[in-house]
Image: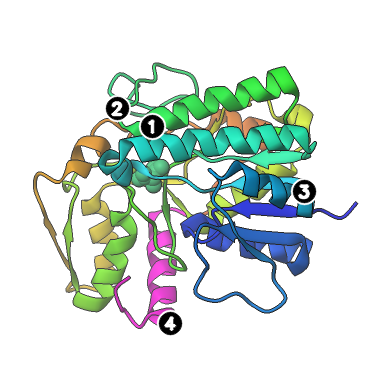
């Protein structure tokens, strides 16, 4: 049977690239992109639907119309924006997920993907080599909603048999679409500013080390998890995965290998620093490696080189 796939929240940093990857794999017409706003351009023969995941009636119609075999729910409010609008973040991140899980059950969707985040960890979680299972006391509404979402996913799997799969993404670095409202966004902004102005004012301190993942690895990992046989997926909350870990100072050093005059300054008292301080600096992803052969390909040097080459080609160094 041909797959019919719906991506909810397709305009974002991950959605933009996941839609392209899924269309390459399954065919243009099989993948319905959807978001609360229209993207800048929609190619003629590619399906796109305007949808608010909180509008249960509209979502119901979407499922009736397309009868999806797979659903990817990417619509979310991230960590920094969530602190400005906590109620809205909770509402979208939790009620959007519940709507999708309920409809996936009702329409017997074969597989559901929902992203979690390293934001599920908190100040009492181990800071380095953070394991899959440990104390989790997230301090942001985003992290709290992701942790609750993980429990709900596992519950829907155990109680109702929904084949829901999830990854705890670290900061994701990419050049095609901008990240929106996260604490790790600096690691994308820095490249744009480096190419445009040769300098960057960073909102995190020089030594704030966070786990990061290049988009190519994120997409490859997501597809590998979704392709894995159901009986190999031992974790139905969410899998730890990571690519590498670095600080702003380390990233600036890697950029200087390509742009020797690049400088970085540090802005004090940004609220995102307090968020980053509660997150792990490195992640242990042994379970993902064991269950679905996860292994990243991009380290700091490879990420930096690829970002610079591609941004030079596409944006001419213009800031996003
Ligand atoms: C954020 O910074 O909020 C996200 C995340 C790590 O989930 N990039």
Q: CA distance from mark 2 to mark 4?
A: 39 Å
Q: Residue at x 70, y 37 (%)?
A: 103
Circle number at residue 64: 3
Circle number at residue 143: 1
Q: Quadrant of ligand 1?
A: top left
81 on left or right of 28: left
Find residue 316 and report its horizontal and vertical position in percent. Answer: 35, 83
Q: CA distance from mark 1 to mark 3?
A: 32 Å
C-beta proximity under 8 Å, tags 1 and 4? no
Question: Mark 1 or mark 3, which has the lower sequence index?
Answer: 3
Badge 3, how many Cα within 10 Å: few under 14, some, many 20+?
A: few
**Which contiguous range is marked in magenta?**
298-320
Nearer the observer, disc 2 or disc 4?
A: 2
Q: Secondary structure at mark 2?
A: loop
Nearer the observer, disc 1 or disc 3?
A: 3
Q: Secondary structure at mark 3?
A: helix
311 on left or right of 295: left
Relative to 46, say whether 211 is above or below.
Answer: above
Badge 2, how many Cα within 10 Å: few under 14, some, many 20+?
A: some
Q: Secondary structure at mark 4?
A: helix
Q: Residue at x 37, y 72 (%)?
A: 308
Where, by quadrant of the figure, is residue 82 drawn? top left
Q: CA distance from mark 1 to mark 4?
A: 36 Å
Q: Is residue 308 one of those drawn in magenta? A: yes
Nearer the observer, disc 2 or disc 3?
A: 3
């Amino acid at each position: 049977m041909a797959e019919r796939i719906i991506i909810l929240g397709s305009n974002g940093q991950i959605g933009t690239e996941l839609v392209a990857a899924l269309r390459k794999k399954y065919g243009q017409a099989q993948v319905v992109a959807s978001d609360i706003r229209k993207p800048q351009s929609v190619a003629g023969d590619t399906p796109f639907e305007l949808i608010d995941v909180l509008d249960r009636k509209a979502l119901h119609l979407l499922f009736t119309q397309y009868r999806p075999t797979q659903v990817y729910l990417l619509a979310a409010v991230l960590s920094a924006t969530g602190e400005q609008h906590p109620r809205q973040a909770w509402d979208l991140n939790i009620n959007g997920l519940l709507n999708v899980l309920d409809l996936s059950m009702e329409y017997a969707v074969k597989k559901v993907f929902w992203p979690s985040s390293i934001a599920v960890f908190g100040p009492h979680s181990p800071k380095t080599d953070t394991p899959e299972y440990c104390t989790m006391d997230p301090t942001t509404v985003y992290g709290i909603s992701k942790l609750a979402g993980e429990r709900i996913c596992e519950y829907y799997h155990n109680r109702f048999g929904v084949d829901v799969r999830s990854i705890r993404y670290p900061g994701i670095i990419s050049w095609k679409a901008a990240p929106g409202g996260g604490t790790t966004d600096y690691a994308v902004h820095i490249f744009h500013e480096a190419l445009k102005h040769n300098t960057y004012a960073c909102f995190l301190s020089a030594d704030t080390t966070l786990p990061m993942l290049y988009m190519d690895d994120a997409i490859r990992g997501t597809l590998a998890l979704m392709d894995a046989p159901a009986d190999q997926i031992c974790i139905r909350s969410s899998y730890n995965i990571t690519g590498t870990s670095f600080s702003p100072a380390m990233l600036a050093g890697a950029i200087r290998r390509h742009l020797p005059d690049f400088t970085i300054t540090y802005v004090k008292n940004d609220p995102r620093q307090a968020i980053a301080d509660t997150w792990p600096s490195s992640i242990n992803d042994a379970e993902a490696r064991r269950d679905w052969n996860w292994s990243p390909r991009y380290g700091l040097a490879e990420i930096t080189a690829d970002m610079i080459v591609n941004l030079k080609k596409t944006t001419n160094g213009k800031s996003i």
